[in-house]
């Protein structure tokens, strides 16, 4: 399954990933500075949610693309469904 996303969807996902990248750098700095573990955990949870949202956006786009190709054979649809289900579960 190729990553085919509209420019606005792609921009949104890339923005989320860039924010997460910045948050990770901040978390590393917090740990190096010996900051409070509760603050570190709070930031880790935030970056985890950001990554999950980016992943779900990518999967949802893939699902939308697959649904648009309604002319697939039943076996192909079943295989695609299994692949998408596996992707969703990998983020759960």
Image (cartoon, helix red, strand yellow):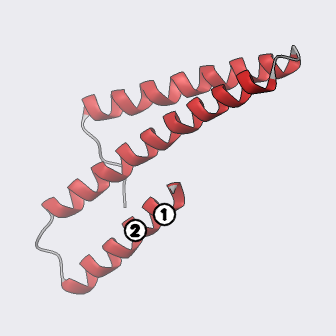
Question: What label does residue 81 carry, if any?
Answer: none
Residue identified by numbered label 1: 89
* Secondary structure state at the residue bearing disc 2: helix
Question: 1 or 43, which is in the foreground?
Answer: 43
* Secondary structure state at the residue bearing disc 1: helix
| Outermost residue to the left | 71
Q: Is residue 25 left or right of residue 7?
A: right
- Measuring from the top left, give residue 22's x and y in whole percent: 61, 19
Q: Is residue 87 left or right of residue 68?
A: right
Disc 2 + disc 1, Cβ < 8 Å: yes
Q: Residue at x 11, y 73 (%)?
A: 71
Q: Residue at x 32, y 72 (%)?
A: 80
Question: What label does residue 85 carry, if any?
Answer: 2
Cα separation between marks 2 and 1: 6 Å
- Measuring from the top left, give residue 51's x and y in whole percent: 52, 38
Question: 76 or 54, which is in the foreground?
Answer: 54
Q: In which quarter of the image is residue 7?
A: top left
Q: Residue at x 64, y 26 (%)?
A: 43
- Measuring from the top left, give residue 55's x and y in whole percent: 45, 46
- Badge 2: few (under 14), some or many (20 or more) residues near its Cα, within 10 Å? few
């Amino acid at each position: 399954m190729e990553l085919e996303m509209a420019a606005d969807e792609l921009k949104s996902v890339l923005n989320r990933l860039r924010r997460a990248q910045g948050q990770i750098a901040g978390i590393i700095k917090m740990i190096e500075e010996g900051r409070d573990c509760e603050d570190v955990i709070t930031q880790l949870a935030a970056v985890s949610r950001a990554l999950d949202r980016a992943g779900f956006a990518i999967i949802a786009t893939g699902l939308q693309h697959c649904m648009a190709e309604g002319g697939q054979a039943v076996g192909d649809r079943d295989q695609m469904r299994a692949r998408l289900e596996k992707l969703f579960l990998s983020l759960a």
